[in-house]
Each structure stands twice: as C-alpha cells, then as structure tokens.
Image: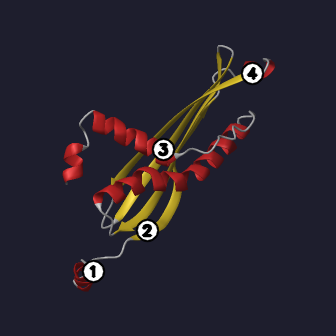
Amino acid sequence: MTEQVTNGAAQGDENPQFSLQRIYVRDLSFEAPKSPEIFRQEWSPSVALDLNTRQKSLEGDFHEVVLTLSVTVKTGDETAFIAEVQQAGIFLIKGLDAASMSHTLGAFCPNILFPYAREALDSLVVRGSFPALMLAPVNFDALYAQELSRMQAAGEVASAAQH
C-alpha cells in the first residue's frame, strides 16, 4: 500500500492545496421601511437570521463561494430594518477527493467568510442608526453535517457519493 502511494506521487498526483485568492462583497442591501418613526418607539428587537451558501467552479481549480446573511429585525410588529450581505471569496483548491472538496466548499470556506460578512452587516446596520447586531459565531461544520444527513435521508447523496 505504501508503494502505491509512493508510485502515485511519482506519477504526478497532486498534494492537496488550499489558497485564499480574494475576499469581496458581492451584494449589499439595507432597508429601514419605518424610518424615522421606528426611532421613536421602544427598542425591543427580535432578530431573524437566514444563512445561505453557494459555490461555483471557476476556471481551473478556482472556486467562488458566496455566503449570504439576511437579517430581518422587528420591534413589536414593526419591521425596523432588513439587511443582507453576500460575502464572497475566490479559493484555489487542488488535489482533494470529492468528499473533502464538498466539505471544504460547504463548511471550511464559509467559516473563513463569516467574520467578514458579520463585520459588513454590522457596519451597514450602524450606518442606518441602529445598534450593531454582533451575530454569534456559526458552526458551519455542524450545518454542513445536518445538510448532508438531510440529503442522504432524501436519497440525494447516493449518486453524488459514487462520482
């Protein structure tokens, strides 16, 4: 078995590589539909966060991963604001098997993007004259595992695991 690995390396198999090429804001939006009246109300916010990731292959071994954070904040029955950021990154990823590539794109890359998205969202909200959200960290590994389990239960992963 050791010989196979050694021979594989000699035949040009690549060592895994991961490199962050660029981080950028892809889209940013903010709406405060009840301004300025909302500022005169007692501030008792309820926060609804929606998280989404998507990825696409670019040329060669480059991949774009986009993390979307959408937040709706209400005070009472009134919507105080709606804010959304699409934080993106371009990653060079080589030499991973399909399962490792899926995990890297679905969990590892969003973990890298999240602090940037959180900061962009907080900056946007503060510019709207609202308190910063200070979102708690997100466990993307757990979210990825949950999604994988859901897909396996629905029979969506069986064919993907064979490729």
Location of residue 83 in the rendering, given as x and y in whole percent from the top left corner: 59, 34
Instruction: For residue 66, say whether it is visible.
Output: yes
Disc 3 and disc 4: Cα gap in Å?
30 Å
Residue 145 is situated, as x and y percent measured from the top left of the image, at 41, 44
Using the numbered discs, state the Cα–Cα distance from disc 2 to disc 1 in whole angstroms.
25 Å
- Dot placed on the residue nearer the N-terminal end, 3 or 4: 4
User: Residue 36: which quarter of the image?
Assistant: top right
Disc 1 crowd rating (10 Å Cα; few below 14, some 14-19, many 20+) is few
The residue identified by callout 1 is 2
Mark 4 residue element: loop
Q: Residues within 10 Å of mark 4 (few under 14, many from 20)?
A: few
| Mark toward the start of the polypeptide (4 vs 1) | 1
- Establish if 93 lies above or below 43: below
Numbered circle sitting on residue 18: 2
Asked which quadrant contains residue 93, the reply is bottom left
Q: Give the labeled residue for mark 3.
A: 142
Real-space CA distance between mark 2 and mark 3, rounded to the nearest whole angstrom: 21 Å
Residue occupied by mark 4: 44
Crowding around mark 3 (Cα neighbors within 10 Å: few <14, some 14 to 19, many 20+) is few
